[in-house]
Image (cartoon, grey):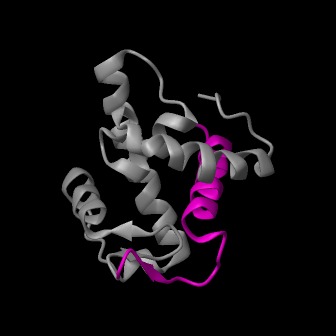
Amino acid sequence: MTNIIMAALLFALQGAETDLSRSPRRGDRGQSYGILQIQQLVIEDVNRIQGTRYTTRDALVASTAREICSRYLEFWGAQYTRDTGKQPTYEVLARIWNGGPHGWQHRSTKRYWTRRVQPYLKLFGHRADVR
């Protein structure tokens, strides 16, 4: 995934999660952290996969939150490719972010994609079908 594609996706996810707020906050009744609303399970998953030692405090730092999100999506996007033989689109990655490793299959993540993420991708000037 190129840097510009990841930058566009991270912009759109931040928009979807916190309306582009620059100040970290907690959401989901205190279960999500920072500009990308990262949950503890995501941090644990990245730490397990990457051998890192991120904490929920790290998710409150914007640059580190983007790093955690990128690592998570790169891993699960590659797993999507192994499972399907296709490259993940913005939609697939956004739905993974919203619904977990197999979130791209869940009907419940479709609305997140269409109502929350797609509008921010358009603001960034990207088509939704880019791979």
View extreme (top): residue: 85
Based on the displayed image, in which of its 4 quarters is residue 76 positioned? top left
The stretch drawn in magenta includes residue 8:
yes
Name the residue at 66% across, 70% down: 20
Query: Residue 24 at x, y = what percent?
Result: 53, 82
View extreme (left): residue: 48
Query: Residue 130 at x, y = what percent?
Result: 65, 29
Q: Is residue 28 above or below residue 90?
A: below
Closer to us: 29 or 9: 29
Closer to us: 106 or 77: 106
The stretch drawn in magenta includes residue 20:
yes
Query: Residue 101 at x, y = what percent?
Result: 30, 43
Based on the displayed image, in which of its 4 quarters is residue 3 positioned? top right
In the picture, measured across the screen, residue 35 lies left or right of residue 60, that is right
In the picture, measured across the screen, residue 55 lies left or right of residue 20, that is left
Name the residue at 47% across, 70% down: 64
Quadrant position of the C terminus in the picture: top right
Q: Is residue 82 above or below residue 45?
A: above
The total number of labels drawn is: 0
Name the residue at 29% across, 76% down: 55
Name the residue at 64% across, 79% down: 22
Query: Residue 59 at x, y = what percent?
Result: 41, 75
Q: Which range is magenta?
A: 1-29
Quadrant position of the N terminus in the picture: top right
Q: Is residue 97 above or below residue 126?
A: below
